Amino acid sequence: MKFAKTALLACTMFTAFPACAEDGADAETPRSDIIVTGAREVSMAGTKTDTPLIETPQPVTIVSSDVYLAQGAVSIADTLRYVAGVQANNYGPDSRVDGSFIRGIDPLQFRDGMRDLFSYYASIRSDPYNFSQIEVVRGPASVLFGSGSLGGLINMVSKRPQYEFGGEVSVRYGSFDRKEALADITGPITGNLAARVVARVRDANSQTDHVPDDRIMLAPSLSWRPGANTELTLIGLYQEDDGGSTAQFLPLYGTLYGNPNGELPHDRFIGKPGWDRYDGRLLQGTAMLDQRFGEGKLSLKARYIDSDLTYLTHYPDNYSNPTDPFLDPAKRVMGLYVDGSIARMEIFSTDNNFQYRFNTGAQIEHVLLAGIDYSWNKVRKTGGFALETIDVYAPDYAALSDYGGGLPEPTYSAEDTSQNQTGFYVQDQIRLWDRVSVVLGARHDHVRTQASGGAVESANATTFRAGVIGELVPGVSPFFSYTESFQPIPGDGTGRIFRPTRGNQFEGGVKFHPDDATLLTITGYYIKENNRLIDDPAKPQQRIQAGKSTSKGFEIEASRRLPGDYELIANYSYNEAYLDEFGKQLDNVPKVNASVWGTKNFDLGEARSLRIGAGVRHSAANWSFGAAFPSGVRTPAYTLVDALVELNWQRWQIALNATNLFDKRYYSACLARGDCFNGADRNIYATLSYRF
């Protein structure tokens, strides 16, 4: 992709709309401050109803786009770097997927309450600029969302049209020759019809040689309000990515461990330039209807996703002999896997519910929610595989084959899996004396999975949820909850169908909220999980299901708006996660994570303001155990610093963001199977914006 071409396309598109702004922003006043959070802030993710955080008996974190963009987030995984209980980018800055752990467990990703990712390497990553906020639910949420992870879920909330003109147009330049143009434009078309368009065009490289990071994203939307009680919103999305894999699966000996030839460069690319790629096209269409009937509300949602992906890659053979993967005495030459797949993914999902508010006494209020959801997905992959060799210290890229620009021959069906799931759920939120909230919920799911070769498996599950939170004294609300989880898993392309993972969690804690500008949550949890997926010790590139696993720990999360225009977010998490059979910490799950982020605003007069911000993130050492390393492989701890400087003048803003400011070189994960993953390099970029 050529930047001149995409920039011209962007400029043409931008001129078709009169204005742009954030949801609810004053069109006459540039954005100059961040409201971190508040005790009365509401979220749909925890209960599927508009419930304040202090009335939800479960920790829910809301990260607004103002916050995560100020923190320098360029991916969805980046938005989670300052959230308690989350290990973001757990395998480094992966340009293929948004990796993270919540409480030591892979979370599922949802968009507007409906799951939008199935299988691996069948779609491209979502764009954080396309969302108004990211909601993180820690702990199981299967009772409301169906298939769900025990650790929690990530829900991305799409930007919607506003009925006042406003917006922004921005240009950006930064590290790795990043060049971008962005726009977010909204406003009314008629008195009851509003539109919005969110767009990004990017021409960039990445921290790995020969791996581009190019994107075109266009998300138009319409909202129609024919009456005070009715709103229909339609959201479209076209996204095209031209990239590759920043993860190069470098050998342990040459990264974490010594090699007579020295440490491999951090930007080392092991593949065929021009052939290796991760290119995708994504189309989405979403419809959401809200209809109010007095004390009742009907919510109907549906989405269709069509995704095409070409993934061609090389990676070294670290796995045949992890302790000595080299083929020559000089410790330079390695076997090289050549792996390619062409994937097509289709998803249809719908979630429909009705909620009704009523009282059963003077001090007893109910919000009853009942609904049905359905999802269908089909993933087809055609693969190709070959073997070559490479000198990882002096790659001869010309000697590698490009396979005619396509898959290695012979090709084969790598995956052909379809799955449908139907769920029925009911929930009652009971508010007693305007001080105590009780949440009771139940759900029944039926799942049918058909894998490659025609194997079919059906599963049924009934899950329950119960929680209570009460403001015993002003500003102090203890809570306790019990939740269950059920997560179907598609097959792996070999005709196998995995059993659904199941589990439960007990959790208790307290939320301190002395005022609306302060929220401190302290929580402890105990999770039991069955049928967890792990790497096969005999074949590390394949997955098997383990028996039982445990995840337990505690989290502290605080946000506070201080006098003098200071804002602060602080987190601390302790997590023990292990397979019960072995009792050792799970691969790549640090026991401790901690972070703090703060900003300060300065009024410079004459419509000028300055904001500065800084953050520190710490991740403790993590371990990996395997047959080749029974005593374990230890990935060292690391601490990173981020920074922000932002100057506002009338409608103009110039911002300078830096992540990993001091360019610390570190490894995110090194595994006993034999490979190591680089951490994120320093990334600095400047953004010039004009706001309406």
Image (cartoon, helix red, strand yellow):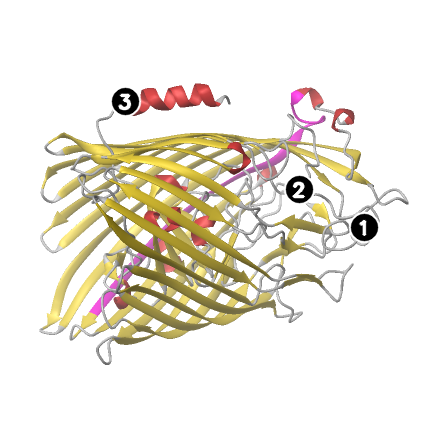
What distance separates the C-alpha of mark 1 from that of mark 3? 56 Å
Task: Identify the disc placed on residue 477.
Answer: none
Q: Residues within 10 Å of mark 1 (few under 14, many from 20)?
A: some
**Closer to the observer: label 2 or label 3?**
3
Q: Name which residue type carries label 1.
A: Asn
Q: Is residue 152 left or right of residue 192?
A: right
Quarter where residue 647 is shown: top left
In the picture of the structure, the residue carrying the numbered disc 1 is 259
Q: Residue at x 80, y 39 (%)?
A: 335
Query: Which residues are drawn in magenta?
Result: 405-430
* 565 left or right, relative to 493: left
Marks 1/2: CA–CA distance: 18 Å
Closer to the chain start, of discs 2 and 3, is 3
Question: Could you tell which of marks 1 and 3 lies nearer the N-terminus?
Answer: 3
Q: Secondary structure at mark 3?
A: loop
Which residue is at the front of the view, 550 or 591? 591
Overall secondary structure of the magenta section: strand
- Disc assigned to residue 15: 3
